[in-house]
Image (cartoon, coloured by chain):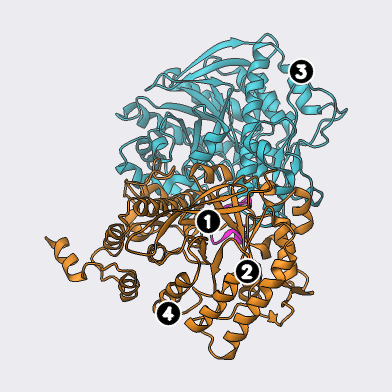
Chain colours: A cyan, B orange
Amino acid sequence: MKFVVENISKSSGRLGHLVQAETGKRFRTPLLVQTTKAGSIPYLSREVFDYITKETPALQFSLSTINHMTESLKLFNGTIGAYVGYPECLSLLLVRDTCTTTPSGHNDKDIMPLFTRRGKEMLTATSYMDAVEVLKPDIYQGLCDADTNLDSSKKRITKSVDRTAQFMDLCYERHQNSTVLNNSGLFVPIVGGYSTFARSDSIKHAKAKGESITSGYIFEGFHNNGLSATEVDVEQLLKVMTHSLNELNVEKPKMMPGAYTPPAMLELISLGVDIFDTSYAYCAATNFKALTFNFDLTKTESGNCSPFLDITTDSLKEDFTPLLADCDCLTCKKHTRAYLYHLYNTKEMAGPILIMIHNLHHMMKFFNTICNCIADDKLPDLVKLVNYQGHDAALDYSIKLNTKAISRNDQGKSFTVAKDDQ
Amino acid sequence: MTTKVPPLTYKVIAECSVTKARAGLMTLRHGEVNTPVFMPVGTQGTLKGLLPDQLIELNCQILLGNTYHLGMRPGIETLQKAGGLHKFMSWPRGILTDSGGFQMVSLLKLAQIDENGVNFCSPFDNSECMLTPEHSIQIQNTIGADIMMQLDDVVKTTTVGPRVEEAMHRTIRWLDRCINAHARDEDQSLFPIVQGALDPELRKICADALIQRKVRGYAVGGLSGGESKHEFWRTVHVCTDLLPKDKPRYLMGVGFAADLVVCVALGIDMFDCVFPTRTARFGCALVNTGQMNLKNKKYENDMRPIDDECECSTCSRYTRSYLHHIAAMEAVSCSLLSIHNVAYQLRLMRSMREAIQRDQFPQFICDFMAKHFEGEPVPLWIREALQAVNVDLPPDDVKVKEAVA
């Protein structure tokens, strides 16, 4: 895996691309990676994903949702991407599922708790690297203790930095000596909650091993995944990130996993973060929110009072307009709000499928616009538009649990459809 | 508008020279339907887990909607404002709706039937409602399906005695009320339903009466309700003998592969069943040998597709192993298996149509049964049903010997 910075914009943001080692295929940054659950983009088969885009996706796998497949993958003659229906994708491996809340605690000595559908499993740096060697992703993150958020105590933050350093010592060793990870890039975790001192410590350790082993950096420990990422204090976050990015090599790609809101993503991109994932689109879809925020700089008149449309609103029952006027996704071209409301009301599976199509399409177009704005040096304008949507005050992009949305029980035994796990 | 062309025309394209099977072309306001056809069930205006585009990709030409469910949600007013179900769900091809009566009797324990209609308690607000033949047709006219079903008086197949005869006669009376109430004969075709439980005499009286009415196709009802397979096939056989050859015949609620093959041989043209999509949600895939339960541990490391010969989007991309790991756990597994199962049903029907057109249907039946039962004895009812239409399956022991050799 290689990363090339192409263009650093005068005012803010930068353009670049990741290069897949084996194929030479390029993935433009800022990059939106498709988050997956158990290897699949939530609700979408490959056939349906192809209705959204013909572009080769980058897929983000979380060990906590695919760990039960690793034994089978040992026997599979092909990549993890091929196993889940995307043979040509760029694969990124994370530890935690960004879509659902990661429970806190259980951080025993040398052990990282992995919350899988089989329950809590004990992950050590060794067992993690064993799994990485089976999965052979294009990019994988180093193991870390990311169990921190804005409320974490100083002690917990220090522990997370220390434990991460311990985990990483072994990860570095295994990565260097591995005979199968030559084409896999290691993204070194930077942790430390919202403490700039702790972040500096984490960065110091990350740099100590030398830059050659590091393909990029991944920033963890700002939230506990799931909806919590949509609620982070952006001001605090930016303070810590500004500080951290100043201490790191510009040449390396930076990744921030989780459901950061579109305004937060834009601010982070302005600072120089390169890679995000689609968890926000998922968190919205699973709570029956269709993304409708405007990012078209040619249409700046105020209109949106909310960045999304709540499909469970009764007034949509006979609203025969598309989710979003002028949207050219399959859902908006073929279906109406009334139909989506009906699918919600009858708890039909096509509901989340169609909202997910729209939300992913919206986010992908959003990222295209971001790239264009960086090239045209207009990112600050976009930040303003997305934040304010033509109003005087910034809009609230956080996503709350929609209790009206279909629950797990309604969908049959163990379908993970609507609820955030907590 | 080409108002002169009826909303349903049917043409027999080929007839099997041995059995009663026929291949036909049914033309509706929303496109052509090649028969024999299997209609997947999209109960509430969607086929569970699949999008209309995927169904078109599979070349599905007609699907079934349930009047009872659609009448409850989204409701008739909404469907009216939407301009009918085709527009509401964005499905440009054929739709057939049932009368709603069957759901009432099967879902609602308290449903009571009298001459006026079906009396039931609304499951939503417990208010007392009455579904009359007129009301059923009014709802179906609003839904706007290409083919509508009359409201019939459904009795359990295994019922005996005067209630069966009463239901049969009432079904005929209700048909006349349905025909009178039908307000969109330019766009929609109303199918009557042959009733009479397992009594050939009653079936004959019913069929004779229905044939007097001006309709464009017929349904065989009251089966698949707990009767033995021997009684089942004999009743189908009786009905297809009674019904005119120049109109399509629809056997309600039948969709297991072996049943489809037998009933096509007996002269049925249209089928529907929830089974392929329902079983998908439980992690089961349909294959020639029956069902494959992908949750079974033995598929954990099986890197083959569900079926080598299947061309569906699931078989072209996913292994049994991966499907095993997500079956009945991840919502996407329901989509993946439903696609395969609907593709399987449609492919089976296509193979039958092609065999009939080549006049090689008897051979097709023998090959199918050999594969389907794989050395197991073919059930007696299948042998007898096929003998009734002049097809002798090879004896089981011969087949077992061949398999050993």
SS assignment at label 4: helix
Cα distance between the residues tagged 2 and 1:
28 Å
For marks 2 and 4, the one nearer the N-term is: 2
The label on residue B241 is none
Q: Foreground residue, A128 or A243?
A: A128
Q: Which residue is mark 2?
A: B213
Q: Is residue A250 left or right of residue B256?
A: right
* Outermost residue, top side: A10
Q: Which residue is mark 4?
A: B231
Q: Main secondary structure of the magenta part?
A: loop
For marks 2 and 1, the one nearer the N-term is: 1
Q: Amino acid at mark 1?
A: Pro
Residue B237 appears in the picture as rendered = yes
Q: Which residue is mark 1?
A: B40
Whether residue A410 is in magenta: the answer is yes
Quadrant in which the N terminus of chain B appears: top right
Cα distance between the residues tagged 1 and 4:
25 Å
Q: Foreground residue, B56 or B195?
A: B195
Q: Amino acid at mark 4?
A: Glu
Cα distance between the residues tagged 2 and 3:
71 Å
